[in-house]
Image (cartoon, helix red, strand yellow):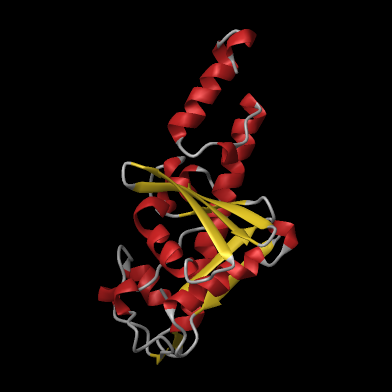
Amino acid sequence: MYAGGWASNKGTNLFYIKNKESSESFVNRIFLSILMTDKFDGFTFYTHNLGRFDSIFILNSLITNKNISIEPIWKDNAILSLSIKYKKIKIKILDYLQLIPGTLENILISYNCNVKKGYFPYDFVNKNNLNYIGDKPSKEFYKNITDIVYSSIPNSNWDLKKETLKYLRSDLEGLLEILSKFNENIFSKYKLNITKFKTISGLALAIYRSSYLPENLKS
């Protein structure tokens, strides 16, 4: 892991791994930027594929910090949520794919979001070129990029760190826009906050109860 960050209605914060910084230290640095700020106490953050991927990095890194406590909730050998506490600050991590399945690109289009999914040469990056500046990577390093889009990328002075953070920003702010729209839609129709539900099935059941069950059976 060499880049990470978070976005909220209070702003976006991006991180890039430093020279000789371990992955564990890097992940701690990202989370402490949230956990050492009182305004985020009680917040719910969403990540991509928490149960199968992100949780591995998070757990392996944060357990090295004795000042941080973690309470995971599991289902079918996958993590549904993480409650993370540092001193008096507590946050919750959920997986947006449990609520809105699909690729981020397709969901951004479906929700008619202002933020658009960018293009990034994942296959180009390795631990030895994290500070690369030079000719743009070959088209073969990108996935699903058209000739027109590829030709629009400047040929020289391509900066890996700069491009990584630009791509990361669009992902984070795009996901924030999706979740904000989804939550506004659900709340306006059913008076339910999506952060109270870990999965789409749990949310669907709550919608059913609020819409169809008699008042004495809703609890």
The N terminus - image quarter: bottom left
Quadrant in which residue 66 is drawn:
bottom right
Q: Is residue 15 above or below residue 116?
A: below
Q: Which residue is found at the position 39% from the left and 69% from the top? A: 149
149 or 51: which is nearer to us? 51
Residue 199, position in %: x, y? 45, 37
- Taking 14 as reference, is 130 above or below it? below
Q: What percent of the width, then of the height, locates residue 74?
A: 40, 44
| Residue 59 to residue 3: above or below | above
Q: Is residue 179 visible?
A: yes
> Which residue corresponds to the image point at 50% horizontal and 61% vertical from the top-left?
171
Q: Is 218 on the left-hand or right-hand side of 81?
A: right
Quadrant of the rendering where the C terminus is positioned: top right
The picture quadrant where one finds residue 12 is bottom right
Furthest-front residue in this view = 66
Check the image and name the residue furthest to the left.
140
Q: How many marks?
A: 0
Examine the rendered structure and indicate whether residue 93 appears above or below residue 120: above
Q: State the residue in front, 30 or 8.
A: 30
Q: Position of residue 52 (x, y in %)?
A: 34, 54
Q: Is residue 42 left or right of residue 148?
A: right
